[in-house]
Image: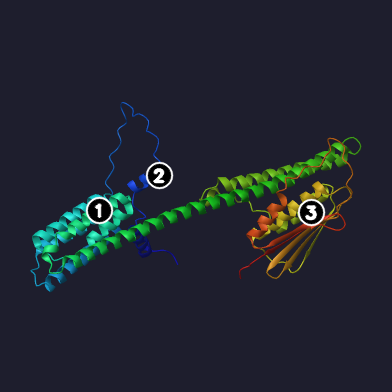
Amino acid sequence: MGFGPASAALAGLGRAITGRDLPETDREAETEPPAAAPPPRPEAPPKQPRRRRPRPRQADIFIAAAVGAVDLLGYTITMRSENAAFTVAGALLLTLAAACLLARRRHPILVLGAILAIEIVVNLVVRMPTHFSLSVVAALYTVGLACRPRTVALASLAVLAGQMTAYGNSEDSFVWTFTGDVTAIALVVGVSAGVRRWQKQVDVNRLLLADRAVTDERRRIARELHDIVAHHITTMHLMSGGARANLDRDPETARAALITLEASGRVALAEMRQLLGVLRSDDDGENAPSAPQPGVGDVDRLVAESCLAGLPTEFAATGEWRELPLPVQLAVFRITQEALTNARKHAGPGARATVRLAYRPGRVTVEVQDTGGAKPDRPPGDAALPGSGHGLLGMRERVAVHGGFVDAGPTPDGGFRVAATIPTRETA
């Protein structure tokens, strides 16, 4: 179900009533720090094209029409109840006051002054009894939204003074009428102050959500870069070391290691280009990368690379196979990739690894375990790659996004085990 013209009109009306579309005013200028002095203007500034005056919006037209209708209805009822003559001049003046609201967005103070002047004329010429027109309410409410407290206080006093010009046309006591006007003005100013405070809170929340989204996106990109770089650089490091060690005595083994090194570098470049393509693409789908993200089907490739890198690895899948959501597949692939990378970096010679993938109802489990192996002293220049400490943290962040958990730690035989359980939440 989409949003039609009616919902768009209601949204515009809501922004107009709450003042979300009002321009910057002296209220913001009072709270914000003073800006730096502008640079000196050039002697012959370029001539700017004349801007067209903004037209009244549909919401403003609707508000002005509704306010005018209510004021005319109130004028008619009041004059009949007081046995006074209904005059066309009074109706035209009230209509003119409501029409002034069309400019309330650009000139809230001038609009309030014009409406008060019209109301005073109505009170003195038409001799209308005491009333509090909706035009005055709307104008004062707009001033409360758009101006600083000092201006709002002066505007409230001006409204009270304008209302007092009709006290001579009423038979009610001065105290009763004055109290009613003060209460009405206080209610209007109080509501505008509450809406203004709500607007500030909404803006603060929007900024906080935007900052949090940027932080989450940075962490996601950092995880992807860590997984891509750590895995492929480790593989390339081990392959280059193996090729160097076997270059003279076993050229074929060195050649195979160099081929694996080249393939790993090619895959790393492809994944980096894909990630950068995602970052550079805009909302237009034509510029978005078309290459798919790695998934469960690529785990076999990770196992093969691990074997070629010198870590014998076995892969086993249990449970009934089913298509997993793409984010879950990417998480399974990256967790397996990072766990095998850590095993190659930290497990000693003679170590073996096992990858187990289990399909369970409502979740999938991936487990990577190595046997540890011996830890002989390494000669200078042949030290293992140091770890950054972000691998396990990245795994936990990936799984936490899906509501799962990771269990990682050493095993009794000196190896290391990583087990991640990820809810799948497949939709029928």
Q: Nearer the viewer, residue 414 or 385?
A: 414
Element class at badge 1: helix
Estimate how packed mark 1 is, as few (under 14), some (14 to 19) or many (20 or more) residues with alpha carbons within 10 Å. many
Residue bearing mark 1:
155
Q: Which badge, 2 or 3, is on the more N-terminal residue?
A: 2
Q: Nearer the viewer, residue 3 or 217?
A: 217
Q: Are marks 3 and 1 in contact (CB under 8 Å)?
A: no
Scheme of colours in the image: rainbow
Q: Which badge, 1 or 2, is on the more N-terminal residue?
A: 2
Q: Is residue 111 left or right of residue 262?
A: left
Q: Are marks 2 and 3 in contact (CB under 8 Å)?
A: no
Q: Which badge, 3 or 1, is on the more N-terminal residue?
A: 1
Q: Is residue 239 left or right of residue 406?
A: right
Q: What separation in Å lies between label 2 and label 3 (alpha carbons)?
A: 59 Å
- Give how far across and how far down residue 328 sits, in percent: 66, 60
Estimate how packed mark 3 is, as few (under 14), some (14 to 19) or many (20 or more) residues with alpha carbons within 10 Å. many
- Look at 35% across and 65% down and name the residue there: 6
Q: What separation in Å lies between label 3 and label 1 (alpha carbons)?
A: 76 Å
Task: Single out the residue that lies furthest toward the right.
Answer: 249
Element class at badge 3: helix
**Tag nearer the camera, 3 or 1:** 1
Q: Are marks 1 and 2 in contact (CB under 8 Å)?
A: no
Q: Nearer the viewer, residue 245 or 163?
A: 163
What type is the residue that disc 1 sits on?
Answer: Ala
- Look at 66% across and 49% down and name the residue there: 224
Residue 303 numbered mark, or none: 3
- Look at 90% across and 35% down and name the residue there: 248
